[in-house]
Image: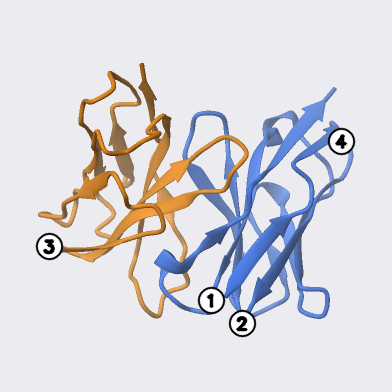
Amino acid sequence: DGGITQSPKYLFRKEGQNVTLSCEQNLNHDAMYWYRQDPGQGLRLIYYSQIVNDFQKGDIAEGYSVSREKKESFPLTVTSAQKNPTAFYLCASSIGGQGRTGELFFGEGSRLTVL
Amino acid sequence: AQSVTQLDSHVSVSEGTPVLLRCNYSSSYSPSLFWYVQHPNKGLQLLLKYTSAATLVKGINGFEAEFKKSETSFHLTKPSAHMSDAAEYFCVVSPGTGTASKLTFGTGTRLQVTL
């Protein structure tokens, strides 16, 4: 079955450490996204990529980094510069960028807790 | 500019009774509108979408929503709630047929279904 796989599902990190969250999709989608979700808030866009080897900052990119070396993969690194990294992180993909309806397909999320 | 307001952060209904989750939007364009559902510790799943075709949109699991331009609303309804409907629901607005990177998420409505 096609879908998006995020790993790990739960992750604990000490302050000052970088951590990388994995996102893999086999939907053959061009565009991929990372969102952050905090209790009582809507999703906020961290980074997105519409094509391999290209990505753009979203609304809250500070303290995060990404890469898009393969169409299937879009890992997110939460760096020590992120002041409040404890959150639920969601990866998503869509068929295309411009001219599309904006429908997203989501992974099951990764919950990061900073100790 | 665009925004979306979910008027209730929490809704509780009895099983078998109707569900109404309210959403108002603001957009400078002719928007696309979506409802997504999220079960605990899971990713989001698309329930239904409006993209300037029929104003009454039917989705999965018996849900439907009506686009009312004059009221700038896109309320989600279901005639009879089931226990499995208990989840968080997000209303999302997109500027017409633009890229998914321009989505704006509401803050969510938690639906509780009681026996």
Query: Does residue B115 sit above or below A50 in this rendering?
Result: above
For the rendered model, the colour scheme is by chain
Q: Which chain is orange?
A: A
Residue type, label 2: Ser
Whether residue B50 appears in this view of the structure is no
Query: Which quadrant, please, contains the C terminus of chain A?
Result: top left
Residue type, label 4: Gly
Residue assigned mark 1: B95
Q: Is residue A105 left or right of residue A23?
A: right
* Chain identity of mark 4: B
> Of marks 2 and 1, which one's residue comes earlier in the chain?
2
* Chain identity of mark 3: A
Helix, strand or loop under label 4: loop
Crowd tier of the residue under label 2, counting other residues whose Cα lies within 10 Å: few below 14, some 14–19, many 20 or above: few
Mark 3 to mark 4: distance in Å?
A: 50 Å
Residue assigned mark 3: A53
Mark 3 to mark 2: distance in Å?
A: 32 Å
x 37%, y 33%: residue = A85
Q: Which chain is blue?
A: B
Helix, strand or loop under label 2: loop
* Chain identity of mark 1: B
Residue type, label 1: Pro
Q: Are marks 2 and 1 in contact (CB under 8 Å)?
A: yes
Query: Does residue A37 sit above or below A72 in this rendering?
Result: above
Residue assigned mark 4: B16
* Chain identity of mark 2: B
Kindly report which numbered mark, 3 or 2, lies closer to the viewer in this rendering: 2
Q: Nearer the viewer, residue A48 or B85?
A: A48
> Of marks 2 and 4, which one's residue comes earlier in the chain?
4
